[in-house]
Amino acid sequence: MKSLKLVFFLYCILFAILQVLYFLDYPLPNFIRFYLADFLCMPIVLSICLLVVQHLKKDKSLRLNITSISSVFLMYTVYFEIILPPIHWRYTADFRDVLLYLAGSIIFYFLQKAP
């Protein structure tokens, strides 16, 4: 669990730095500009979900099961890649985003099981 907390902390810092760079309009490679946030998304969101569940249940040994992780992954995929692109100009449907959501979900699944 310590490894998950460390990754969560590092991902949050990396995401914050990325947002500052966006705000400053700093030139970034396209992969970082368009895809890094998608990769960071699932581990951050799922870590927050896990912490909330552990707090509510008062059981620090709880872990999210594959069904819960898959549900969040599918919800993000449907919402951000299917529902939003036709109704808001800022969002575009991109299969690479889905793959990055999936990669982040898989990383979270294994990190939460680590000691």
Image: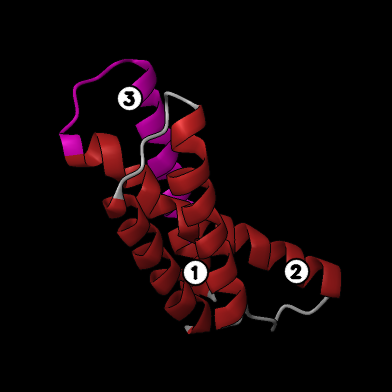
Name which residue type carries label 2: Val
Identify residue for label 3.
Answer: 21
Answer with mark 1 or mark 2, whichever residue precedes in sequence.
1
Identify residue for label 1.
Answer: 4
Identify residue for label 2.
Answer: 53
| Horizontal side of residue 56 vs 45, given as left or right | right
Q: Residue placed at 62% from the left, 74% from the top?
A: 68
Please state, as top left, top right, bottom left or bottom right, where the N terminus lies in the image: bottom right
Q: From mark 1 to mark 3, how far is it between C-alphas?
A: 25 Å
Residue 52 visible in this rendered orientation of the protein: yes
| Horizontal side of residue 70 vs 29, given as left or right | right
Query: Which residues are the magenta region?
Result: 8-30
Nearer the observer, 22 or 84: 84
Residue 23 figure quarter? top left
Q: Mark 1 packing: few (<14 Cα in 10 Å), some, or many (20+)?
A: many
Measured along the vertical axis of the image, is residue 36 above or below residue 8? above
Nearer the observer, 86 or 57: 86
From the top left corner, tell me how far across and down residue 67 is, in percent. 59, 79
Name which residue type carries label 1: Leu
Which one is in front in this view, the residue at disc 1 or the one at disc 2? 2
From the top left corner, tell me how far across and down residue 5 is, in percent. 53, 64
Label 1 SS: helix
